[in-house]
Image (cartoon, rainbow, N blue to C red):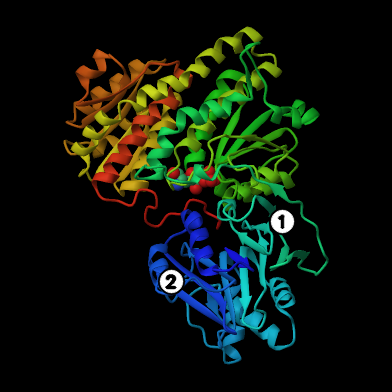
Amino acid sequence: MGVAGKPGASRVLIEGLKTLEYRGYDSAGVAIQHEGGLVVLRRAGKLAELEAALAELEPFGTTGMGHTRWATHGPPTEQNAHPHVDTHERVAVVHNGIIENHEAMRRELEATGCRFRSDTDTEVLAHLISERIKAGDDLSEAVRVTAQRLEGAYAFVVVSADHPDTVVGVRHFSPLVVGLAEGASFLASDIPALLPHTRSVMPLEDGDVVTLRPDGVSVCDVDGAAVERPTRTIDWDPVRIQKGGYKHFMMKEIEEQPAAIAATMASRLDDATGSIHMDALDALGDRLRAVTRMTFVACGTSWHAGLAGKFYIENIVGMPVGVDYASEFRYRSIRGGPDHLIVPITQSGETADTLGALRDAKAEGSPLISICNVPESSAARESDAVIQTEAGPEIGVASTKAFTTQLVALYMLALDLGLRRGVLSHDDVEARITPLRRVRYAMEGALRQAALVKEVAHRYADAQDFLFLGRGVNYPIALEGALKLKEISYIHAEGYPAGEMKHGPIALIDASMPVVTIATPGRVYEKVLSNIEEVRARDGVIIAVCAEGDERVRALADEVLEVPAVDEDLSPLVNVVPLQLLAYYIAEKRGCDIDQPRNLAKSVTVE
Ligand code: M6R
């Protein structure tokens, strides 16, 4: 985050960084203009360490910048924390992303006698910019010319003691948004940091160099040509990014899911006519007619949503669907074309791997519809059309409500495509819409079981490993249950299609291995029961997610996590709830940092 012209800048920066800490939280630092020099303060660990150090001083400064780090080059020590400074501490830089050619520049600088104090790729920037300033450039010019030399995907922000009212930022494939206010300007890598100061924001584009001063901002490209970027007014309610009495954002977000999926349906379902309409498909116009296949590209939890989406599109529309990790898609020889619809799925819209896949597919002429939760994000802006999920800001690093809104978006996409392609009639769609509307109540029913899930969680909180099994549309839910558990409790967990267990993972099963199995009604129900028997025969401990009152599962399982019965297609929305709660309560019992688990970041903006 950067600020130019706001009294009490030290406090402004800390408060802003608190809203950005989800992006990285292994160390933090600020550089603030003060009495003709820069006050640079850095701390290893959470932002609270830096906040405590700054609290010893009165709020000070009007211009400066701050950063929270997710380590790429060098361990998360104070020495490697940002800002990084030049030899005389007249220039300071904070940076997200990676400077890929930093080693060559470091060697060049070292050959001229420059001494480096960190392991980071960032530090070269401070030295290079300092040299340009010494050669006579002003700060904007020095930054712009330095940016011309850089390779990689990054955003960085610079202050200089010789330019006390100025902050300069560069965006190149990592997000950077400007905030405009009376007498002050701001920039940040995400909008929530700006909201206490302004609702008027200007998202930057790749290659932009922005200069902030108290009286306004100017933007140019790396060649120095002035560019205009539109401003937008943000109408979010800041209350949505507060914990609201919950111990963790994750629990708040788990409980927000029924409302979030309802909001995602709201403008797309018409109760009066029983029909569905996805504007995003209209936006593709004639290009949609040429489409013969589809690929979802995504990472992590969003990739799991893509697996469920494959099930929906193939079963409902009959169109072949690929699901690829975005980081793998980029390196395939077949990546798109005019008949190949690419659907990036991304909560943040800023995941570097997903953006890379999106850009590659675009270059090959694919139509692009993103499923995205952040309308101002890069993915949303760079796609031909966007299906916006209405999860609202998701702060907990472990994704919950973004996932279930993605599932709903994918299901609606399948229905609308089915209608447009003539494989579903209006009556078919109408028959599916009523249960879709009602599924939020089943989720609420699943949430009401939280106390029972907590008891089960406490009984297994010391387990070393977990296996998660599911079949069909609940196979992705098994993967998601395992990911949630490992992310926030650090217990080793694996998700498998239940039918695949006998081909290897069964070797792991013994009396110490809890096996969480999704056994709700549907076409694979009997098969899953057979898989449960296979686990029992090897003394494994069965924790089953099953429909309320299912006596067959109850007779086989050691523990049951009951959920209201719903249509099989919609069951992932309900079945994932006890798995999210299980992970949450196990992590809580183990004393883990639930909203900011170790080594992770909410938005992974490096490849
Ligand atoms: O913002 P995105 O949906 O693109 O993020 C993708 C993954 O990084 C994300 O889902 C990650 O796996 C979460 N930590 C899962 O809880």
Q: What residue type is labelled 2?
A: Leu
Q: Where is residue 422 in the image (x, y as percent from the top left)?
A: 69, 14
Tell which of 384 and 475 is nearer to you: 384
Tell which of 594 and 324 is nearer to you: 594
Pointer 1 or 2: first along the chain: 2
Alpha-carbon distance for marks 1 and 2?
33 Å
Q: Is residue 484 above or below residue 221?
A: above
Crowdedness near tag 1: few (<14), some (14–19) or many (≥20) residues, C-alpha within 10 Å: many
Tell which of 54 and 41 is nearer to you: 54
Residue 400 visible somewhere in the drawing? yes
User: Which residue is under mark 1?
Assistant: 205
Query: Regarding mark 2 in the picture, which secondary structure is present there?
Result: helix
Position of 13 with respect to 511 (left or right) is right
* Residue 542 placement: quadrant: top left
**Would you say the beta carbon of the disc 2 residue lies within 8 angstroms of ligand 1?**
no
Position of 447 with respect to 228 (left or right) is left
Q: Position of residue 350 (x, y in %)?
A: 59, 50
Q: Where is residue 243 in the image (x, y as percent from the top left)?
A: 42, 45
Circle count: 2
Q: Where is residue 593 in the image (x, y as percent from the top left)?
A: 33, 52
**In the rendering, which numbered label is found on residue 54?**
2
Query: Regarding mark 1 in the picture, which secondary structure is present there?
Result: loop
Which of discs 1 and 2 lies nearer the camera? The answer is: 2
* Residue 410 placement: quadrant: top right
